[in-house]
Image (cartoon, rainbow, N blue to C red):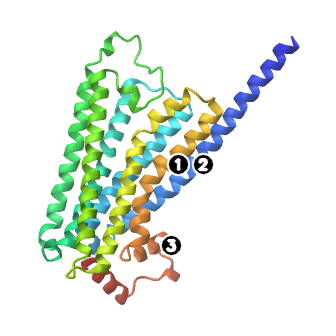
Amino acid sequence: MFANQSQTNITVGKELQSLVSLVLFSLLSTVPCCVFLFINGTLLFTLRSKPVFCETARYVLLYNLLFADTVLLAHSQLMYLIAACRIRLTYPVCGFLSMMGGLISVISPLTLMMMSVERYVAVCYPLRHAAIITVRNTGVAILLVWTFSSLNVLTQVFLLLEFPFAELESLQMEDFCGKESLLLNPVSDLYEKAFTYSVFISAGVTVTCSYIGVMVAARSASTDRASAQKARNTLLLHLLQLGLTLFSTMHNSLLLAISMILDRITLISIQCFLYIFVIILPRCLSTLIYGLRDQAIRPVLIYHLCCHQKHSTVLSEKAKAKICILITS
């Protein structure tokens, strides 16, 4: 009797420890997520607050990238909390959430690819940059990216509908909702891997080639060295962001492999760590790269983050003139 009671106490203690860890790590992931959602939302508003941002191609691309990252960040946090609370969804609900995440996740690497090409043209062909990289051409490119991503989602839906759901006793999922849970046949799994690898390889090659082109152009006497150096640093950050985004696509698969060899409490700790640095961090790099480094955006962003406080002051005419010079340079 005493042995059974002791075993029960140990089990209850482990469950309580697991619950405390779950609540703690959920808070640790939710708080930074909410902070960056606020900053991202403020930067999105900033990019629509001044006509000069709406009429410059690179800021239009930045808005598209930031919008996709912000939506994906909110979606990832929602899926994380659903899994943490052990809520099992139905296949239709899980399918909708997963397809929405799949639609947005493709936008970031493709937009990074376009932003890299824009920087390459700005440095290597400065006289033709204004004619090639127009707001109209940028809008068409963004529309093509969203169309390409939508076609990928439609293809995944058609592959998913081939599964005989009518033979199931219930549409309630036995496992937690995730992208891997909807790869119900080998064709879907093969298509998902082939599409993901092809997108990231194409984006990686484009960013790398743009970086090499900028480095070669930086050695030319006719090239602005300061502009080339800044573009090279931006492209390096794009490569880092692309690598982290690629790693985030393997997040769930990595957790499944780790769960086979570790206990639940240790797994929760590793899951929270990976979630913050693999899922949240890549979605916040756009704000850190452009919101803090870009001298045109930074004063306007700080002004809006300070909630229009008088001590932050409205931008002076001299500051506005400086922003216009930085954008056109």
Tell which tag, 2 or 1, sits nearer the viewer. 1
- Can the viewer see residue 54? no
Q: Alpha carbon of mark 3 to alpha carbon of mark 2: how far?
A: 25 Å
Q: Are marks 2 and 1 in contact (CB under 8 Å)?
A: yes
Q: Residue at x 18, y 75 (%)?
A: 126
- Label 3 belongs to which residue? 306
Q: Which mark is residue 28?
A: 2
Q: Give the mark, 3 or 1, whose residue is nearer the N terminus.
A: 1
Specify the quadrant of the image occupied by residue 209.
Answer: bottom left
Q: Which residue is drawn at 49% across and 26% down?
A: 88
Point out the image quarter for the N terminus: top right
* Closer to the camera in the image, 316 or 257: 257
Residue 27 higher or lower than 319, as above or below: above
> What's under tag 1, amino acid-wise?
Ile
Residue 12 higher or lower than 107, as above or below: above
Q: Residue 276 carries which label?
A: 1
Residue 221 higher or lower than 271, as above or below: below
Task: Categorize mark 3 by other alpha carbons within 10 Å: few (<14), some (14-19), many (20+).
Answer: few
Specify the quadrant of the image occupied by residue 247.
Answer: top left
Q: Alpha carbon of mark 2 to alpha carbon of mark 1: how far?
A: 9 Å
At mark 3, the secondary structure is loop
